[in-house]
């Protein structure tokens, strides 16, 4: 069986880290499937998905790390093409990736004790984000 739902989120951009674990858990519970996989996919090219220990220190560290990897204050060819000033956000999103797959057993995701699912919005403005959650299993 496959169940596909979309979660709509309002994000602040600028490396906004949003914990969506509870949304994904709710979709899994709704599926009533015992075991399988959950795929999380954020639509758009300026956001990504991953797992982290969602706590203020690590959230700040992630923001600083992405600023070092793809800084906001340097020229990007994308900005010259489109003039929207978010070239760095496309680079960051491509490095993080748009999707994540998590196994589940006995109706629960197989996550580490401190592991939560997050969406990171790298764009340079607030956005309405759609996250596709697809549950496949038996």
Image (spheres, rainbow, N blue to C red):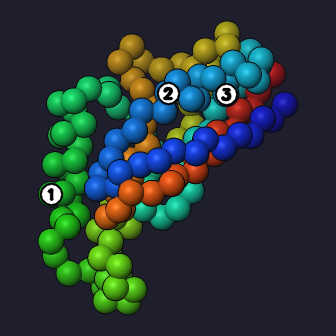
Instruction: From the image, state whether disc 2 or disc 1 is nearer to you.
Output: 2
The structure residue drawn at horizontal position 22% and vertical position 47%, both measured from the top left corner, is 63
Which one is nearer the viewer's eye here, 128 or 132?
A: 128
Q: How crowded is mark 3: few (under 14 residues within 10 Å), some or many (20 or more)?
A: some
Q: Where is residue 107 in the image (x, y as percent from the top left)?
A: 67, 13
For this orientation, the residue located farthest to the bottom is 81
Q: Is residue 94 among the parts visible in the rendering?
A: no
Which one is nearer the viewer's eye here, 19 or 34?
A: 19
Which one is nearer the viewer's eye here, 5 or 99?
A: 5
Labelled disc at residue 68: 1
Q: Name the residue under label 3.
A: 27
Q: Where is residue 48 in the image (x, y as percent from the top left)?
A: 44, 51
89 in relation to 60, above or below: below
Q: Which of marks 2 and 3 is nearer the N terminus?
A: 2
Q: Position of residue 103 (x, y in %)?
A: 60, 26
Labelled disc at residue 115: none
Labels 2 and 1 touching (C-beta < 8 A): no
In the displayed structure image, the side of residue 127 where residue 122 appears, left or right: left
- Which SS class for mark 2? helix
In the displayed structure image, the side of residue 136 where residue 21 appears, left or right: left
Residue at mark 2 to residue at mark 3: CA–CA distance: 10 Å
Q: Mark 2 points at which residue?
A: 21
Q: In which quarter of the image is the C terminus?
A: top right
Q: Position of residue 11 (x, y in %)?
A: 41, 49
């Amino acid at each position: 069986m496959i169940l596909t739902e979309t979660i709509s989120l309002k994000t602040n951009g600028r490396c906004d880290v949003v914990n969506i674990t509870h949304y994904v858990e709710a979709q899994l519970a709704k599926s009533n499937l015992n075991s399988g996989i959950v795929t999380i996919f954020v639509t758009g090219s300026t956001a990504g998905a991953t797992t982290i220990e969602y706590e203020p220190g690590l959230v700040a560290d992630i923001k600083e790390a992405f600023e070092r990897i793809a800084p906001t204050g340097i020229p990007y060819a994308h900005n010259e093409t489109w003039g929207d000033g978010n070239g760095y956000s496309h680079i960051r999103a491509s490095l993080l990736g748009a999707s994540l797959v998590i196994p589940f057993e006995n109706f629960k995701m197989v996550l580490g004790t401190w592991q939560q699912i997050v969406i990171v919005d790298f764009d340079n403005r607030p956005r309405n984000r759609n996250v596709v959650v697809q549950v496949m299993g038996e």
